[in-house]
Image (tube, rainbow, N blue to C red):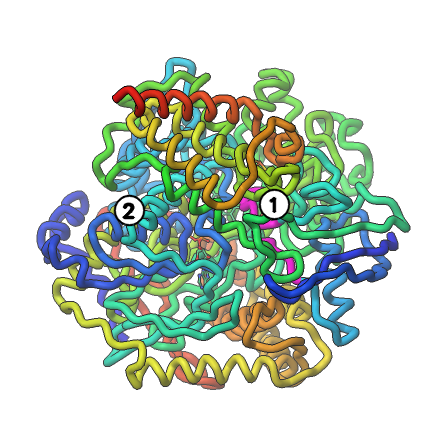
Amino acid sequence: MNLDPQIPEGPLSDKWDNHRFSSKLVNPANKRKYRIIVVGSGLAGGSAAATLGELGYQVDCFCYQDTPRRAHSIAAQGGINAAKNYQNDGDSIHRLFYDTVKGGDFRSREANVYRLAQNSTNIIDQCVAQGVPFAREYGGLLANRSFGGAQVSRTFYARGQTGQQLLLGAYSALSRQIASGQVKMHTRHEMLDLVTVDGHAKGIITRNLVTGGTDAWTADAVLLCTGGYGNVYYLSTNAAGCNVTATYRAHRRGAGFANPCFTQIHPTCIPVAGDHQSKLTLMSESLRNDGRVWVPNDKESCGLNPNDIKEELRDYFLERKYPSFGNLAPRDISSRSAKEACDEGRGVGPGGRGVYLDFADSISRLGESAIRERYGNLFQMYERITGENAYNRPMRIYPAIHYTMGGLWVDYNLQSTVPGCFVLGEANFSDHGANRLGASALMQGLSDGYFVIPYTVGNYLARSGAGSISPDGPEVKEVLESVKERTSQLLSPQGKRSSRSYHKELGQIMWEFAGMARNESGLKKAIGQIQDLRDDFNKNLIVPGEGDRLNVELERAGRVRDFIDFGELLCRDALERNESCGGHFREEHQTADGEATRDDENFAHAAVWEYKGEGKEPTRHKEDLKYENIELAVRSYK
Amino acid sequence: MKLTLKIWRQNGPSANGSFESHTLDGVSEDSSFLEMLDQLNEQLLGEGKEPVAFDHDCREGICGTCSLTINGHAHGPEDSTTTCQLHMRKFRDGETVTIEPFRANAFPIVRDLIVDRSAFDRIVQSGGFISVRTGSAPDGNAIPISKVDADNAMDAAACIGCGACVASCKNASAMLFTSAKAAHLNLLPQGQAEKDERAINMVKTMDEAGFGNCRNYGECSAACPKDISLDYIAKLNRDHAKAKLKKIFS
Ligand SMILES: Cc1cc2nc3c(=O)[nH]c(=O)nc-3n(C[C@H](O)[C@H](O)[C@H](O)COP(=O)(O)OP(=O)(O)OC[C@H]3O[C@@H](n4cnc5c(N)ncnc54)[C@H](O)[C@@H]3O)c2cc1C
Ligand code: SF4
Ligand code: FES
């Protein structure tokens, strides 16, 4: 497997410029000869499809929702980072770069992260010009807030709906291209496989979710912008349809999968209420700007009304353990601290799996209306779900799976190990290392889509030349047939168990053994249990109805089947990564006071998995991470 | 809780649909309406029957995918709430709940409770954007925008494109949606250059898509999960009239 990261020459700050200059350009008149497939219409896919269409390429864009505007980017609440330094508080491109590498616990690629920080400022300009209604100060200038893992205020936001507004911006740009005929939008289409010809990505196979039709689409390049795989845990903050199918199927066709065990647990989610639960809801981390996290000092007080627990009987554990970052400590650290408190029996709410997030101090300092202005919709959402009013009683929160740093391996050009197959947004692995800082995913999706891919895909196309193959070619037919075969396999067992019940069971295994804390024996157990689950799935699944029409159960069965295989890969990766870093906490590797200990000597690399065939063990490769501009340090937020 | 569910079933756009009744026991008050339907579907699967098809994705009230007319109300009885955020504690034990798709000529039924709302996309494609090339934008702080204008634009931009406004309107008018989309951009300085075209084209596309006329009944805003204000309809009417006049005189 070729894992050359293709990092351009020159000093860090000049690499992207140098690279753009040395990239080949496609002549404007020739652009229309090239077809590009974009799978996904979130921030990454939407911005890429719009920009490539505008440049003159012929773009086919796909999403599984009924409209591109509903991609899960829409759910992002808190904000988007940019090194604008509008607050004059000491921010700079270098600081955003440093914070991101440090936040990622030194497991990301320097050059990519630096480019991300450089592009961050253009993103804000672009979005403002599109009409994204970012929050403003009274003087009319853009407002900022702080986010975890940073000591400067660099997060731009649109109330609690930043992702929605950024996505609507990308969607409006995309709509303009759809109207002009540059982009053809295919909604309610799910990608089920990647087509390669002579090792190059040349197309995809989709299922039309309305008619059930299986179709082949060919192009000169394929962009996967299909989001993260958090739903492998069943309960997560992802949307119901989020899946690993697109990336896992590409993995089976040769794309290396990097660091699948790097998953992020978000500290501020609404705790699980019962067995009926189908998803977990995030309360934006921006709440930690004004909320204080605590549990009672002793177990006995956990059942009391929190307002009756005296100040001196409360443990504000983040402020105690991390005085300089306090309630804004990074996500992995905050999540683990909450788990520890609950493991000690000091958790609150149903099952004792919850901690308080208390706004009483902020409300008395700033007034209820100021808090309502900042977080009104979040408080409302909390009340709908729990029936409790957080203006006069602290919220209960607990960590939940939220984001996945791992993804398909890409080089500096965002190209996977399959030439012509590019991966953008959360679906790739590149920028966040072992832990992502808040407000950095939106930034990455838009950087990839608006500002990186137009150059790098152009360079690829200019060098490889136009020549997409016919959808009737033998290579395409073969993949198409294998997809049809798989569909009929899913329909055939007629057993007793629903795909949802398998998904739930998989999620329980994953959360128990590959969740917030992991260890060798647990991971081995998980792998065994997942293999048993797969055998059972193949024999006992039930999918009613036929394949040649809308069939929701069939859709879910296909996704769950891929999650099962992928869950095993995730556990394998977690097992092999015998160190703690970022969101990957191996219990064997911690300090006396429970902090993660990295092993830079043996693990300063991205682990990249190569698929070896059904039932065969995958091979683990390495991309060594070289730090030339940042000194590897022990991450401390104390 | 134990519920009787009267649910609309329909095999396809041209098939005849009808209500089907099911009893569902053991529903938790803490579960959401869609989780209750998940539970029903698991029960149907256990009986070897075909589950009910319905649209949903984020399940947190922001993507606008979920729909359903519940006991005659688009998104159910609770104000300012999408179906996915509606919780069963709002219903009584033993209650009969009627569940239908969002009904409108411009929203054909795809299957059971799923409808096709792509007409909304076409309205946006006809003018719901600001034509700005990627990479050509001035600095974000180059044009100060008053907080009042920014907030007002944000209020309009909060629309999730769910279609409850259409489903709750006697005339199945899409005016609340269209006006919110237009107002978001027409209220901002960046949106001024294309304001007239936008108003004319979006209204035209809306009319062509088969939505009914707006008669200011106001049911749309009452049903809207994001409390989009009727003021935007008045604004679009003004913008549209002005744009038409300008066209006549130019
Ligand atoms: C609740 C929540 C809050 C968040 N808040 C923040 C925040 O405040 N700041 C921040 O920076 N980040 C935040 N994030 C993270 C951030 O929103 C995501 O990482 C980011 O939006 C992902 O964008 P994307 O374009 O990569 O993928 P998505 O937006 O998930 O888009 C994926 C697209 O791929 C399509 N797709 C997927 N699979 C297939 C398939 N098989 N076939 C066809 N199409 C497919 C989908 O239809 C969709 O269009 C949050 C995430 C969540 C879940
Ligand atoms: S205006 Fe309200 S009801 Fe209509 S689509 Fe928008 S959010 Fe839904
Ligand atoms: S499912 Fe997204 S708004 Fe209801």
Q: Amino acid at mark 2?
A: Tyr
Specify start and end residues of the magenta stretch as a single range. B53-66
Write the residue at 34% across / 70% down: A217
Measuring from the top left, give residue B65's x and y in whole percent. 57, 50
Q: Secondary structure at mark 2?
A: helix
Q: Is residue A463 visible?
A: yes
Write the residue at 27% across / 32% down: A92
In front: A532, or A445? A445
Q: Which residue is mark 1?
A: B60
Measuring from the top left, give residue A357's x and y in whole percent. 64, 34
Q: Amino acid at mark 1?
A: Glu
Quadrant in the picture for the N terminus of chain A: bottom left
Question: What's the CA distance linking mark 1 and mark 2?
Answer: 28 Å
In front: A392, or B239? B239
Whether marks 1 and 2 lie on the same chain: no
Residue A23 located left or right of residue A567: left
Asked if residue A144 is positioned above or below residue B103 in the image, the reply reads: above
- The CB of the residue at mark 1 lies under 8 Å from ligand 3: yes
